[in-house]
Image (cartoon, rainbow, N blue to C red):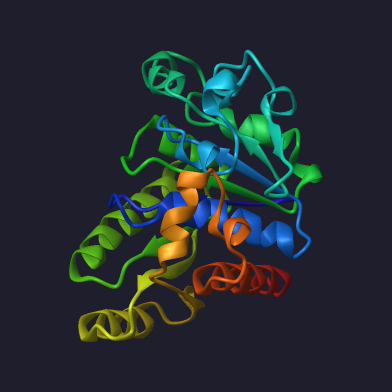
Amino acid sequence: MAHIFCIANQKGGVGKTTTTVNLAAGLAQVGQRVLMVDLDPQGNATMGSGVDKRQLPHTVYDVLLESATVAEARVRSEKCGYDILGANRELAGAEVELVDLERREKRLKAALSVVDAEYDFVLIDCPPSLSLLTLNGLCSAHGVIVPMQCEYFALEGLTDLVNTIKQVHANLNRDLKIIGLLRVMFDPRITLQQQVSDQLKGHFGDKVFNTVIPRNVRLAEAPSYGLPGVVFDPSAKGSQAFVAFAQELVERNRST
C-alpha cells in the first residue's frame, strides 16, 4: 500500500512545490515507486517535473470530474524517474464544478485507491489556500509534510494549518496526521532562524525531521530548466539534502 502524503502549508512562498518535486525525485533515486499529484491550478509541480502542462491530454481535473482514471491521466517523467498526475489552468474551474457534486471532497481518494498498489509513495502538491482542491488532497492522505521557513510569521501559519488538520481529521479523514515539519531555505548564520528552529524542536519534538534543507541557488534555478534540483544538479548541497530527506522518510515509514 502506498504512503500518501500531502505537502501543505497555508502560508504561500514556503517552497511547497520545490519540496514536492525534489522529494519525489529523491525518493525515485533511492529506489521508490512514486506518483506526484499536482493539485495547484498553476501547474508548477507539473512543469518543474519536465512535463509541459499545455500538452497534457488528461489532467487531475479530469480525474476529479471522473472523466478519466489516474491510469489514463498520469504521465511518466523519464528524466525524473516518477509518474505525474499533472495540472493546468483547467483545474481552477474544478472548484466551481465540484461544489454541487456528490462526494466532492473524496473524489481524489477514490481515484487513487485504484492505483494504490503500484506505488510506494504518492506526494500531493496542494495550493496555499484551503480550498476544495486542498480538501481533496487532505482527505486522500495518511499524513501531511509541512515545509516551513524558520521565521516568526511561519509559526503563525503553522498554527492555522494544525487547526485545519484537526478539523479534517475529526470530520472527514481519521487517518490524517502531521507526519513531520521540514525546515527549508535554512541559513544557520541567521540567529533568528536558529532560534525558531530550536522552538520548533522544543514544541514538536520528533515531528521535526532531522534533515534540514539549506538555502541553495541551484534549487532555485532548477525550475527554469523544468527539472527538480535533485536531477538538475545532483551535486548541489540542496539536492543532496533532499536525497537525505527521502532516505529519512523511507526509514521513518519502515519503523511505523
Q: Is residue 175 visible?
A: no
- Quarter occupied by residue 155: bottom left
In-front residue for pair 106/3: 3
Query: Measured along the vertical axis of the image, is residue 81 above or below residue 27?
Result: above
Question: What percent of the width, then of the height, locates residue 122?
Answer: 64, 48
The answer to which of 215 and 167 lies nearer the viewer is 215
Which corner quadrant of the image does residue 115 belong to?
top right
Coordinates of residue 167 in the picture (x, y in percent): 37, 48
Q: Tell how many labels.
A: 0
Q: Residue at x 41, y 57 (%)?
A: 220
Q: Residue at x 42, y 38 (%)?
A: 134
Q: Position of residue 213 (x, y in %)?
A: 46, 72
Q: Is residue 14 placed above or below 211 in the rendered structure?
A: above
Asked if one can make out residue 154 in the rendered structure from this viewpoint, the answer is yes
Quadrant assignment, res 78: top right
- Residue 225: x and y in percent read 52, 46
Q: Residue at x 54, y 37 (%)?
A: 46
The quarter in which the C terminus is drawn is bottom right
91, above or below 2, in the image: above
Left or right for 188, reference 212: left
At 54% from the left edge and 45% from the top edge, which residue is drawn? 124
